[in-house]
Amino acid sequence: MMQLFATLWFFAHICVSAGDVCSSPNSPACGDNSTRSGGNLFIQFRQGITKVREPVRPVVWVAQPFSDCFRPCTSSPDLKPSQLRTRGCFTIDGEEVSEELCAALPRPALTRHCGCGVLGCDENVCKDLHPDAEDTTDNEDDEHFECLGCYPVAEEEYQPSFLESKEVSLLDETCIDHNEQSGPCRGGMPFFRMRSNAMTPVMCFEFCIGEGLDLFALVQGVECRCGATALNLVWQGKKPRPGLQLPPTMQSSCLEEGECPMRVYRWKGPFVSGGSVQSHLLKISEGDQAHVTSVVLGEHVGLVDGHVHDAEHEEAAGDSLTQVTAAEKTDTDRIDPNWLRNCPECNAGRHWWERSNVTPDGMIDQWVDVVVVRYNWAASCVDDEVRKEAFRAAAEVWRTETCIALIEDHTRVQGQQHIRVNKASSGCSATIGRAKPSEVYLGWCNSMGQRGNIVHEIGHTLGMHHAQQRMDGPQQYHGYGPHLQLYWENMEGNWAAQYVPKAGPYTGSAYDGPNDVWVGHAPYDFESIMHYPRQTGSKGPYYDTIPASNNNLVGQRGRLSEGDILQMTDMYNCVPIVVTTPTEEFPGPSTVRLTDVTKTGFKAVVAVPSGTTVSSGTMSVSFFAVAPGLRQLPGASGLWLEAGTISMKKVQQGKKCRDKSMSRSWSKVDFSHSFAEPPAFLSTVQTTNNEIGLPTGTSQPWFTVATNSVHNADAWVSLELSETGQVSVPLVKTDEVIGWVAMQTGTETFQDTQGASVTCAAAVSDRSITHKTTSLSFGADLGVAPLVVASQSTRWGGDGSWAKIVGTTSASVQLKVQEDQTCNDETGHTREVISVAAFSSICTL
């Protein structure tokens, strides 16, 4: 075993180390209520309760979406970055009227503070926006309603059988296929039907406003129905289909005595974002949202989530559902449960690398470090202020509840990793995980009422899969589940594919070191925002939960569940990547294998190929440990440094002793940062998932890392079996994790956390390193013989090889490449390229 000469301590915010290892309204519209001397008090009182102007039709405030965030032009403690919006007074059928008519109603604010750190203020534009001096209300006094009048209902709804009926469908589909010649559908309240033996106006209001609908009605006193005025954006900015709104005349007013078959009420507002109910009032689910959309469009749309309908978007870029599925089918038979994967590989979606220990302005400072995910607008969406506000609101949910800092960044372009927000004609979809760029398509997700669905889609771009596709969802898996009873025969179209279990989704994770937020199997999360609702088709429901008492938990889109927050915190609370290089201290072909990498350390052992005589002794090596993500070193040059992992079973084999049952292939590593020139690329296998020989014998299967084609923005890697293919290939049954570090070439001097001055260098050789010792300059004299790690960056030799460090001086490192001797004793090797990183002393940043 290797001797440990230095203890490495990691802090979550960074991880670059080198070491040596073995209000009441007082409206002007209300008249004058003050007491006066003399006169007739009775007449004064009568005057006091008479309104100066009474609207002929009900009115409501409508605020438009907030603008971009502006920096103040004047330096003043009273001025902060702010957003601006407009507002107007409208009748409920959409006509703009004098604001005096809305004076007695809750008034939406015109400005609000914002953070340039998350909304990306334009440096060339500024505005001095002062907070509203007048009384405004956004989150208070917005739960008031008033009775509009009594309206007629259909003939059958006057019959005793209507009152006696106990069974009504909440998601009443009658109005989806409504014939416009048939008059008002459900009296012009077309969306939902709910019954209760304790039905009250308050109960009905809370239900309908929670669905984003501003009209509600009590039918014969026993049934609640929901509708929407013309101002409501549930109509998607279009004129409602005939029969879906209240008739133009009522049967009687709310104050008249006599029958009132359908007593209709309306919410008094204010609307925000051009016609949406404020998000804190919404309690809508995915299934309910799909139902509303179906009624509006007059067609059965299934779910708003568009993976089934918009698969072509997913195939266009990144790790989409379609692309991931093919790869995962070979992984569903893995012997070990998938909660034994370390994070971030505990979830198959590509995770985002960029991290910062500085919380951006506009985000709550509650994390040691944050994961930075940048987004901007596609051309189709850049002028759509309503969709933009809805996406910004969804991004805020992630920033508030997790360490994910979603940041608006208009400098990102095609080829750089970011989320591009697009407009689409239908559906609502996203690609899975990090890509260049990741895509979110906002079709029916077109207003603040769809915020929850957009939160769901952002979850996909962060690497999350549909919760119902967990391996322990519809089946028993390593002692857990099933949690769903699927009715495959009821599923229509392509929906069955959304319930097939996959190995990719998060089900928990292995131990990632001290302060790990979760270890082992994670409970099935019925309330996940990523879970589909209990769909029902013409043949019946698609599934029941196990137990069935949880049927009403699934499909919610109001919040991130505790399980969603756990998953993100676990996935992005990552262990470091460790890179190390064998030295000549140990005789013969040998490498270093790592295992049990945590935030505070790792285990390492010398590994020799099968067929090699095992020698005793120790090997002193240097290591480089870096937390996943993108950072700049704190020196004057600000060298860029990026680290990450990739999991694979792909291999490269030598020409000799090759196992032809497994073809040679490569996997691409994409950098989030585009380096000015190809970086120094360093890599080491982080796991021993297939190992059966170590630590007492030779390594079986033996491998190191093969690297090829390192470019400014990517590199290609594989597991290098060299000449051990015939022995090793049969044993490579599950993925191994390759850790990699890409470092901008050059030199840098900085101070570490202890205040010590450290000089570092990163360099890449030309194609000159062979099996003979060759010197590579650091590009500067570091003053002392530094701690060095190195990796081979090419694979020109047919038999495979790896880098070894022979010795170091203050200005250079002596290197060679080595082959294994499983098939023969020949060790000659053609010229290769090697990358190195050197630090003048042990340090922690």
Image (cartoon, rainbow, N blue to C red):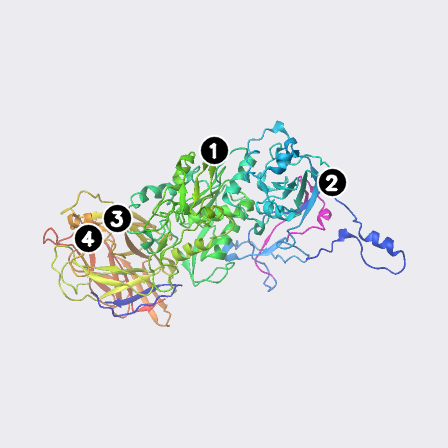
Q: Mark on residue 538?
A: 1
Point 17% across, 61% down: residue: 696
Q: Which residue is mark 2?
A: 253
* Of pointers 3 and 2, the one earlier in the residue sequence: 2
82 falls in the magenta region? yes
Which quadrant of the rendered structure holds the N terminus? bottom left
The answer to which quarter of the image holds residue 778 is: bottom left
For the magenta stretch, what is the residue range? 79-108
* Of pointers 1 and 3, the one earlier in the residue sequence: 1
Whether residues under marks 3 and 4 lie with C-beta atoms below 8 angstroms apart, the answer is no
Q: CA distance from mark 1 to mark 3?
A: 44 Å
Classify mark 3: residues with Cα within 10 Å, few (<14), some (14-19) or many (20+): some
* Of pointers 1 and 4, the one earlier in the residue sequence: 1
> What is the three-letter code of the residue carrying label 4?
Pro
**Under tag 3, what secondary structure?**
loop
Q: Mark on residue 700?
A: none
Left or right, 779 with respect to 87, comes to: left
- Vertical comparison of 818 with 748: above or below: above
Point 49% across, 62% down: residue: 365
Of residues 522 and 513, the one nearer the viewer is 522
**Under tag 2, what secondary structure?**
loop
